[in-house]
Image (spheres, coloured by chain):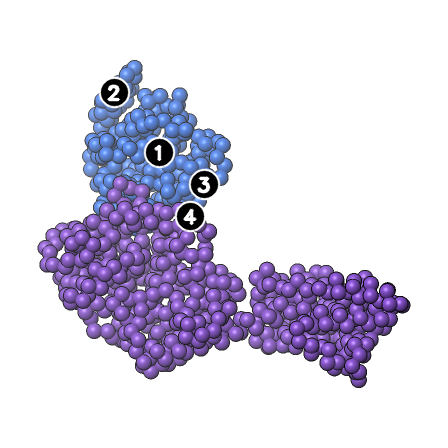
Amino acid sequence: MLQSPKAYKKRLIGKLWLPKAQHYGNILRPRLRKNKRLKILSLTSDDNYVEIPRLIEGGLAYKQDVFLWTYDHFKKMRLQSEGFQVLTPARYEDTVTKSSGVIAEHFPFGILNLDFISQDPKMSQGRMELEIESIEATFKLQAKSPADSLQGFILIYTTMVDENSVDVKNLISKLNSYHVDGWPGLAISSYPSLAATLNEKTGIINKVLKAIPSKYDYTLLGCHPVTVDNILSVVLAVKQI
Amino acid sequence: MAREVIGHLSFGIYKNFARAIRELVSNAYDAGATEVKIGLDLRSKTPKVIVRDDGKGMSINDMRKKLFRIGTVTPPTDEIDEETGRKKIGQFGIGFLSTFPYCDLLTVATKKRGEDTIVEVNVETGRFFKGDTFDITEQKVAYKKYRSDLPTEKGETIVTLEKIKPHIVNELKREHAGRPDTSIDRFEGFNKFKWSICQFAPIQYPPNQKDLLDFFTYEGRNPLRLWLDGKELFRNIPLGAEILEKGEEKFGDIRVKYVTMSPMRPVQPQEARGLQVRVRDVGIGLPTDFDVVKLKGRVLGKLNHICGEIHIIEGLVPIMIDRDSLSYTESVAKMQDFFRDRLTKLNGKLENWASEDKQIYSVLENVSDSKKIVSRLQSAGLIRYKKERLRLPKKKIALLSERLPQVMQERAQERGFEIKVEEKPSIRLPPIEVLSRERVLIIRTGHPSLKERITILGKSFDVSSDEWGYTDSVRSACKIEGHKAVFNTAHPIFDLKGLDEETTRRLVLGINLMMDEQQGKKAILTAFYQLLKELF
């Protein structure tokens, strides 16, 4: 059973998301003092989108630059009635990996809050692998989009670490299938074939997340994982080389 | 559906987009919604407006009977619905139809309280038009059912106006067209829409308007909360508006509660001038002065300073189908007469206040720290108008400080202040003091800075007045004692028509001074010429 969405968000916003976003926002947009004017994409819930006002009040974006994502048609309408721009109602991980063209025009973003817990995920085998694959696809979209003045971004990945083990071998080969010229790919031999425990899973996720940026010519500014019960949230900040 | 209803609709009565949205909000109100959220998505390729409420929702049968059967007239009732604590707004069953001209696709997704499914219906609104006029014919509308993620006991209705017509999108996106604030037509499109919604929708007064919130709390009034693009909306109340009067009246079979207000300057925007009539808490048309100027045949100079609200709280009110006017019944006529009379009297009251305020400002003109005194008098409500709002005469009004307590008497009484007059005060004390806590206003009439001074022919005199016997000569109208000039207020020269009091005093003093000081015809003529130059 998922932890109450309001509870985990409240803790993560104050502890990780907002302070790190502000820190890296300053690095990415040092000249803008009052508001960093970052374009935000946030996977969120219709009954709890508390991270948005916090990020806006925190001087990171204006409301008109916020795009929300929700998987459900009715949730989308509810969020739209709050005056938000909401993108396609579908699973983010499915859209970005299989039909990224639908959303490509909205990229790049300054902050990508990929909070998969807000999307009421089904705890099934292969879920986390797909989420990580979607991060790879997100990097690809970010790198492919016309360069803006920002030349970097902040990615927040939040997921529920469940009992299903992660098929690391399969994951690595999927990530390697996102071919980039001159990039040799992740060495499968340096990863275990399965990750079963919470520690193993968070370890693998961190390692993979740190490896993805260089593939798309980004320098890693920082990677900050936090675990709250069985929830893992990682803030990743990157800048173009 | 009656042909005349279609006629009304086709004739363009629903020409105002905000009023169409008002109809959706009114539907939500009747459905017992406590919260309504309106979102405008004008930047996407298919602009849309979403209106969501937490009312009781509808089943497919309810939709068939109420929503899609256009023109189902419900006999008006004055009963309060037990479930909602409200009196029903809808009568004609055409509110929903009012949105049709503004979009090409209308989606209604609704979940009825007590059920677990959402019913979603898509209506291609274009099918109901022939050119610019409604063509209401029977149309089949398909629907889909989904399992809802909401708890069974909750209801919800989401109406989405998709593919909004370009002229509406352009209007909503319109930026400043001119000087802002003066008229809603000069507002940015979004602000005009917002203003209109705030004006018409059955919502609450701003939280800082405690008097209005208290006064307009009555049985059957149960406003909903309304958000536009995530921001909560409240009734439009002009900044700084002060309540002039409030009351309750009965006219035939209708009972009203009313409040009149003024910000002590022209009410802005101009559309807010006059009294807003509300039935079931919904604005009927724009605020009106009931054509008082036309019917009374008088110019009412301060009429545009007045705004207010009239809530019809009891009785079956005959509202026209456009919901922008009332039928002219005997009760309505009586009500209109009453408010014409009130507006005329209030106009007189404001004109009187303005004239008194002018006199007070005039007396305070020579006081060194008058700004501080004025600000205290203003916050105690003892001066209503701001100085810049009044056209003070270039020449000082002839008001002796002794008359100040008299001028301020009525307003002090209204505000619960007692006036204390000190004729021989210490110079160190301010000439006027407001003791708000003690509700005392001290006017130190003998204070030197309140003393009127007249400067004439290069000399300055403290002025006071008295009465004594007089002759035809101007000499008996004034006595000069050193730096003091005492005027004989009994002298008929002060009743002279054509000259104001100030000029008369200066003339009298000047002649007396000239006669006292100048010797020889030539010197007197030169001084007289100088005096006339100074005066006129």
Q: Is residue A17 left or right of residue B28?
A: right
What residue would you read off at disc 4?
B176
Left or right, A102 with respect to B516, comes to left
- Which of the 4 image quadrants contains residue A227? top left
Q: Colour of chain B?
A: purple
According to the image, label 3 marks what residue?
A: A59
| Residue annotated with mark 2 | A179
Q: Residue at x 37, y 42 (%)?
A: A64
Disc marking residue A109: 1
Q: Residue at x 48, y 31 (%)?
A: A30
Identify the mark nearer the N-term, 1 or 2: 1
Name the element at disc 1.
loop
The reply to whether the C-beta atoms of the residues labelled 1 and 2 are less than 8 Å apart is no
Depth check, front residue: B15 or A46:
B15
Q: Chain of mark 3?
A: A
Horizontal side, residue B3 vs residue B262: left or right: left
Chain letter for the blue colouring in the rendering: A
Q: Residues within 10 Å of mark 2 (few under 14, many from 20)?
A: few
Above or below for B146 versus B62: above
**Lower position in the chain sequence, tag 3 or tag 1:** 3
Identify the chain of the residue marked 2, using the numbered disc in the image: A
How many angstroms separate mark 2 from mark 3 (CA)? 37 Å
Q: Quick check: do tags 2 and 4 share a chain?
A: no
The chain letter for the residue carrying disc 1 is A
Q: Is residue B173 above or below residue B64?
A: above
Query: What amino acid is at disc 4?
Result: His
Q: Is residue A31 above or below residue B530?
A: above
